[in-house]
């Protein structure tokens, strides 16, 4: 056997032994007890605070917005995708039915171009190719540089919601 092959075999053997030793040292103690994951991660995840209430909670008070959204392009989009976590809002909003909500319970109302562009900016990774044709219907994508309407009086760029109703664009 040539000398370089012997050295290569020895080098591979050393790498494999080091890998096995490191695997035993670095593997968490609870890994593999009930599957191919760290078992203690289940308890750690259970301890995390819940922040999301779900879209069904929104419908109770905002039924008219839900009916608008139900027939639009955003019908399948969950409310908290744009408005943020709403669990505190859902739990405590009824206490303020006769007055204005405190700032801590208000949800975000995205209205700037950057908010819409999170999903609607042209992104090659989102384009769905079906039988050698490009189908952008999955998410309507815009070129922010080309579709950039300007307010004629102030000479500033308009926000998307100035022209499009976000719940039924």
Image (tube, rainbow, N blue to C red):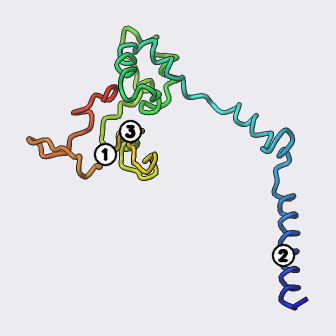
Alpha carbon distance from label 1 to label 3? 12 Å
Q: Earlier in the sequence, mark 1 or mark 2?
A: 2
Q: Secondary structure at mark 1?
A: loop
22 up-or-down from 66: above or below: below
Residue at 35% of width from left, 14% of height from top?
64
Q: Position of residue 86 (x, y in %)?
A: 49, 25
Q: According to the image, label 3 marks what residue? A: 137
Whether the residues at callouts 1 and 3 have beta carbons within 8 Å, the answer is no
Quadrant holding the C terminus: top left
Q: Quadrant of residue 96?
A: top left
What is the x, y in percent for residue 68? 34, 19
Tag 1 residue: 142
113 lies above or below 145: above
* Residue found 40% across the figure and 22% down from its top: 102
Q: Which type of secondary structure does the marked residue at label 2 adopt?
A: helix
Q: Mark 3, mark 2: which one is toward the viewer?
A: 3
Residue at position x 83%, y 46% in the image: 31
Residue wearing tag 2:
12
Q: Are marks 1 and 2 in contact (CB under 8 Å)?
A: no
Crowd rating for badge 3 (residues with CA inside 10 Å; few <14, some 14–19, many 20+): few
Relative to 98, is 11 above or below? below
Horizontal and vertical percent position of residue 12: 84, 75
Which circle's residue, 3 or 2, is located before the other in the chain?
A: 2
């Amino acid at each position: 056997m040539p000398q370089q092959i012997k050295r290569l075999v020895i080098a591979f053997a050393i790498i494999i032994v080091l890998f096995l030793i490191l695997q035993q040292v670095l593997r968490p103690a609870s890994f593999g007890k009930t599957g191919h994951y760290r078992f203690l991660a289940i308890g750690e995840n259970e301890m995390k605070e819940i922040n999301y209430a779900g879209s069904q909670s929104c419908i109770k008070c905002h039924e008219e917005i839900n009916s608008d959204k139900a027939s639009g392009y955003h019908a399948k989009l969950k409310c908290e995708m744009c408005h943020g976590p709403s669990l505190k809002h859902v739990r405590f909003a009824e206490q303020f039915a006769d007055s204005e909500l405190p700032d801590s319970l208000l949800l975000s109302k995205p209205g700037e171009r950057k908010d819409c562009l999170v999903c609607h900016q042209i992104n090659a990774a989102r384009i769905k190719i079906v039988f050698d044709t490009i189908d952008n219907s999955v998410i309507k994508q815009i070129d922010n540089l080309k579709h950039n309407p300007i307010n004629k009086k102030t000479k500033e760029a308009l926000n998307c919601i100035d022209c499009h109703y976000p719940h039924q664009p």
